[in-house]
Image: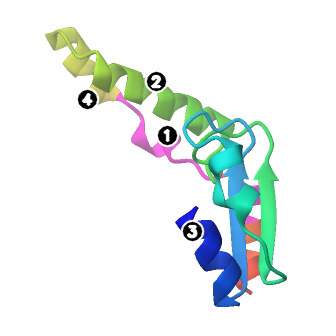
Amino acid sequence: MSAAKCAGKNGVKTLLIHGGSDNIVARGNAAINNAKGENITKYIADGKGHNPYNTVEAQSLLDELSEKLMTIKSEEDKKYFKTFDFTAATQEDEEVMKLISDFIG
């Protein structure tokens, strides 16, 4: 809510992006839902989770990684981290990144 208030009051051109399937920040509590002002541009990334700038595949890998981090129990689990493809897990969505780039100008 603080981010929403700040974005609305500051008068600075602001882009808010929210994943349409974000399971961490509910849209009702998100800045994108609560910020108001002519300076604000909003974009809902349909089908995206908490990191809407990532591809769906990258988000899936990050979700898998998070689950593994919560359940490490054996040496076999630790091997998972040595073979995890961090590059694939941070693959950016071209459409969202273009939107950001165009917004910045």
Q: Which tag is nearer the camera, tag 2 or tag 4?
A: 2
Amino acid carrying mark 1 in the image:
Ala
Q: Is residue 45 above or below residue 43?
A: above
Q: Which tag is nearer the camera, tag 2 or tag 3?
A: 3
Amino acid carrying mark 3 in the image:
Ala
Marks 4 & 3, CB-CB < 8 Å contact: no
Q: Which tag is nearer the camera, tag 1 or tag 2?
A: 2
- Kindly identify which residue carries mark 4: 82
- Kindly identify which residue carries mark 3: 3
Q: Mark 4 and mark 1: span between their CA atoms?
A: 14 Å
Question: Position of 103 compared to 92: left or right?
Answer: right
Q: Earlier in the sequence, mark 2 or mark 4?
A: 2
Q: Secondary structure at mark 1?
A: helix
Is 77 part of what is drawn in magenta?
no
Q: Are there few (<14), some (14-19), or many (20+) residues within 10 Å of tag 3?
A: some
Q: Earlier in the sequence, mark 4 or mark 3?
A: 3
Is 85 part of what is drawn in magenta?
yes
Residue at the (65%, 60%) spot, across then down: 31
Q: Which mark is residue 64?
A: 2
What secondary structure prevails in the magenta region? helix
Q: Earlier in the sequence, mark 4 or mark 1?
A: 4
Amino acid carrying mark 4 in the image:
Lys
Amino acid carrying mark 2 in the image:
Glu
Q: Earlier in the sequence, mark 2 or mark 3?
A: 3
- Which quarter of the rendering shows the N terminus? bottom right
Front one among 10 and 19 = 10
Q: Secondary structure at mark 2?
A: helix
